[in-house]
Image (cartoon, rainbow, N blue to C red):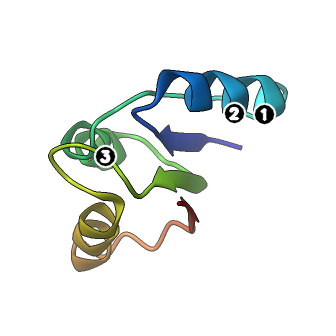
Amino acid sequence: VDILIVEDDNSTRRLLERILKDKIILFLRLKGSKAIELLENHHIDLIILDIMMPNMNGYEFAKELREANCMTPILIRK
């Protein structure tokens, strides 16, 4: 399973990494725009998405994904 985690907070990212370490193939700390670029070039099965991010918040990120016809499931973390 390829999971993309879009999270800007280091402590939250490390916690998720520990919890999911056996399940994750792809784990990134990215800003929204970089994560969208990554999705254009890689198959992702699930996105764990932080809402509160700089530059592009999680809602804007999800909207951009859907407008680009990306139907990857998104788990939103508030």
- The total of numbered circles placed on residues is 3
Tell me the quarter of the picture where residue 59 sits: bottom left
Q: Where residue 55 sits: x, y (%)? A: 15, 46
- The amino acid type of the residue labelled 1 equals Leu
Dot placed on the residue nearer the N-terminal end, 3 or 1: 1
Structural distance between the alpha carbons of marks 3 and 1? 21 Å
Residue sitting at 34 percent across and 32 percent down? 30
Mark 2–mark 1 Cα distance, whole angstroms, equals 6 Å
Q: Nearer the viewer, mark 2 or mark 1?
A: 2
Side of 43 relative to 32 (left or right): right
The numbered mark at residue 64 is none
Image quadrant occupied by the N terminus = top right
Give me the disc on residue 53: 3
Q: Residues within 10 Å of mark 2 (few under 14, many from 20)?
A: some
Residue, x 30% and y 67% (percent of image)? 65
Q: Position of residue 2 (x, y in %)?
A: 62, 41
Q: CA distance from mark 2 to mark 3?
A: 16 Å
Q: Secondary structure at mark 2?
A: helix
Residue 73, position as x, y percentages in the image = 57, 68
Q: Residue at x 59, y 32 (%)?
A: 12
Q: Which residue is mark 2?
A: 16
Mark closer to the observer (3, 1): 3
Q: Residues within 10 Å of mark 1 (few under 14, many from 20)?
A: few
Label 3 close to label 1 by CB (< 8 Å) = no
The type of residue carrying mark 3 is Met
- Camera sees residue 62: yes
**In this rendering, is residue 39 above or below 75?**
above
The residue under label 2 is which amino acid type?
Answer: Leu
Residue beneath label 1, please?
Answer: 20
